[in-house]
Amino acid sequence: MSISRRNFLKGSAAAIALLSTGGVFHAFDQGAFSTGKGSAYEPWRVWNQEDINSDANPLFRLIKASILASNAHNTQPWLYRIGNNEIDLYANVSRNIGTIDPLFREMNISLGCAIENLELAAKASDFETKVTLYPGGFEQIRVANIVLTPAVVASPDHYSIIGKRHTNRAAYDLDKQVEPATLQEMSNLANSFPDVKIVWFSDEAHKTEIGNVIINATEAIIGDKTQSGDSHKWYRHDWDELQRNKDGISIDSSGNSGMTRFFGKVLPTSIKSFNDYWIKLTKNPQVSTASVFGMLLVRNQSDRTQLIQAGRLWQRMHLWAVTKGLAAQPLNQPHERRDREVQLGIEPIFGKAIEKLVNTPGYEGMFTFRMGYPTSQALASPRRPAEEVLLT
Ligand SMILES: Cc1cc2nc3c(=O)[nH]c(=O)nc-3n(C[C@H](O)[C@H](O)[C@H](O)COP(=O)(O)O)c2cc1C
């Protein structure tokens, strides 16, 4: 990405100020020279490597792939228990995002993403899988049981992409649009999930309509101090905190250029500056450069198993998209706002806006995203290693 003369001068002035205030040491402290390094990023390097000690149990390797799944706010709300020939997946409800996800919608979608990776890894390791999802209330913590039987299974196409998939929050290429045939192929991925559908927003009028709903919802979240505070709790500005917690959102995954990320790490931040920046990025480049928006629909978003199926589909779609050179970013502000309206019992402004966008009788919209061809490579986000999320 090119740097304009004005930005270069601004950057140079800031760099001089930084150097003259002993800020270089601070820059080191804050990981300004260590993007993607440290133990928080190790799971991306070792996920498909055989490690004789920890991989003595072959099922452990499946968990190393599972934890690289997409997940809301990078909360990684999962726990695993390995049995003789099975893995149980549990929701770690202590990692809920509070008023951002009061109905546990995003937590369950995230768990679905984790199951998809786990199943791909199982097949790549020659296991046949039988996945059982547990229905029931959202307080019920055991989510799924996956029985694994040794078998000769064709290695799945998307397996090798697991370690290359990252959410891309940067500008997408406005000169290269996603073709209708590509969208159709992605819609076909939903065929394995009878309760889940995809709707696309690809013409200008529909893109503007959904783009405005996303921007308005972002503003509504920012205007709700409790909700934006709950979101901000998962923002990791401090490098030590990021390396310690190995979770959350940081400036490295923001889609910003190298120089902006450098200064973002070094300069102090506040919730106000974070929110100002969030709305700015949402408008441009995120909404403004989307080639296409999409929404996942389920028949009933109060049914946990349907949310999990939608999560499996999202992970499958994102992996598939990467094989086609596409970039993707969920943009769930309208749904986060809709859930908050339900929680507070207030007028369903975003509930109604989503219904209007969906316009499909018998289905509810519960997950929005954008796709397009990337202008830059997305960076990895931190992960807690498989060892840390294993129940003994
Ligand atoms: C249910 C769900 C909701 C998400 N919502 C958003 C969102 O609104 N905005 C966004 O930028 N990313 C969103 N994401 C992406 C996550 O933030 C991302 O997967 C996580 O930070 C891990 O990063 P990675 O996908 O690069 O591995 C969402 C992901 C999931 C599964």
Image (tube, grey):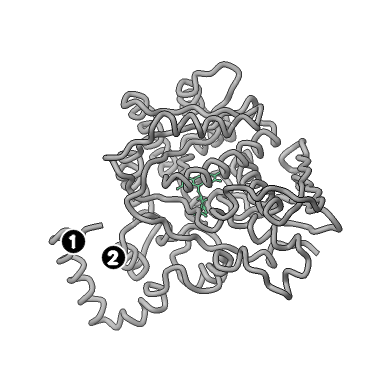
User: Which element is circle 2 on?
Assistant: helix
Q: Residue at x 40, y 31 (%)?
A: 213
Which residue was labeled with disc 2?
259
Quick check: can you spot residue 347?
no
> Can you give x and y, in whole percent of width and height, for residue 132 in the image?
78, 41
Q: Does the residue labelled 2 lie within 8 Å of ligand 1?
A: no
Three-letter code, disc 1:
Asn
Q: Which residue is drawn at 35% across and 39% down?
A: 290
The answer to whether marks 1 and 2 mark residues whose Cβ atoms lie closer than 8 Å is: yes
Of residues 209 and 295, which is closer to you in this image? 295
User: Which element is circle 1 on?
Assistant: helix
Residue 23, labelled with which disc?
none
- Dividing the image into 4 quarters, which one contains the C terminus? bottom right
Which residue was labeled with disc 1?
7
Q: Given the current orientation, which residue lies at the most extreme top position?
A: 361
On the rendered structure, is 170 left or right of 369? Answer: left
> Can you give x and y, in whole percent of width and height, for residue 189 in the image?
57, 34
Q: Is 212 drawn above or below residue 256 in the view shown? A: above
Q: Is 81 drawn above or below residue 178 in the view shown? A: below
> Can you give x and y, in whole percent of width and height, for residue 25 in the image?
36, 82
Three-letter code, disc 2:
Met
Q: Say few, some or many: other residues with alpha carbon within 10 Å of mark 2 (under 14 / 14 to 19 / 20 or more).
A: some
